[in-house]
Amino acid sequence: MNPFKKAIKESQDYYENFITRSVHSSNKIEGNTLSYAETYAIIFNDNSFSLSDVKPREIYEAINLKYALQESLKQQDNEINPSLIVKLNEIINKNIKDTSGYRKIPVFIRGADFVPPEAKYVSNMVMEQLYFYNHSTLPLLERIADFHIQFEHIHPFEDGNGRTGRLLINHELIRNNEIPIVIPDNKRAEYFEYLQNYDVKGLAHMIEELQKVEKEKMNLYVKEIVSEDIDKSIEEDFEDRDI
């Protein structure tokens, strides 16, 4: 069994910690100001925690990303495909933009020195990148890094491209029995630099280093979770998990 799946089955504490860190960090990269504690309270319905000066959009961003992550986990046996990509983005944007499908308008990225392609090219470009990803001979982490960078440059949606793309990184890591990652806020500038410069090896190295960090966190909750002797009898179904 994938070590991550084993960890979240065996430890509710790790499970909640990973989900909260994933949602909090990915949203924070995009400018969301919720604290870790506020994010946890929102996505796990902790009514003992009082929220103040919280913007409605930020609440939706936390809730939506939680459910998009849930959808990714439920479809863990499936390769990334256009329908999954679109569905994840629609969940991320629910009650914010309520977008449907790929963008139909031009978009511009603040702080980037490139302009994403015209909307009419997006669908074909995503299909091409999926083909290249599935037929690439690069090592797995470089394949994932290359796809992520290309995806973010295509910017196929009106909003939520970064959050969608980071979900896809972890979707593929878990699907390939790899440990998922959380990109912390202190790595934000480094992460954006790799995207800006098409630095596949740099991003792949970052993913590898963050996997080591996540492995250590997993082992705090479930000892020797990544040992070779993994119990294969544990149910791999996420349906019963309220995330």
Image (cartoon, grey):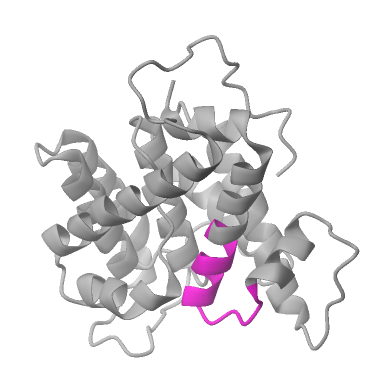
191 on left or right of 45:
left
User: Eyeballing the image, is 186 above or below 14?
Assistant: below
Side of 71 relative to 229 (left or right): right
Q: Is residue 39 magenta?
A: no
Residue sitting at x 50%, y 72%: 158
Q: Is residue 204 visible?
A: yes
Report the residue that reaches farthest toward the top.
233
- Residue drawn at point x = 27 percent, y = 76 percent: 190
Quadrant showing the N terminus: top left
Looking at this view, is 236 or 126 the one in front?
A: 236
Quarter of image, res 162 = bottom left
Residue 145, above or below 242: below
Q: Residue 145 vs residue 166: left or right?
A: left
Q: Is residue 23 magenta?
A: yes
Which residue is painted at 28% across and 44% down in the image? Answer: 130
Farthest residue, direction left: 137
Across and down, in percent, residue 79 comes to 39, 32
User: Where the C terminus falls, by quadrant?
Assistant: top right
User: Visible in this render: residue 116?
Assistant: no
Give the residue drawn at x 37%, y 50%.
Answer: 169
Q: Quadrant of residue 64?
A: bottom right
Q: Position of residue 7 (x, y in %)?
A: 53, 33
Q: Quadrant of residue 72?
A: top right
Residue 125 at x, y percent in the picture: 27, 56
Of residue 98 and residue 163, the one placed in the foreground of this image is 163
How far across and down, in percent of the image, does residue 149 sit?
A: 25, 62
Seen from the viewer's position, the closer of residues 204 and 131 is 204
Number of marks present in the image shown: 0
Q: Where does the magenta region start and end?
A: 22-35
Horizontally, residue 91 falls left or right of residue 81, namely right
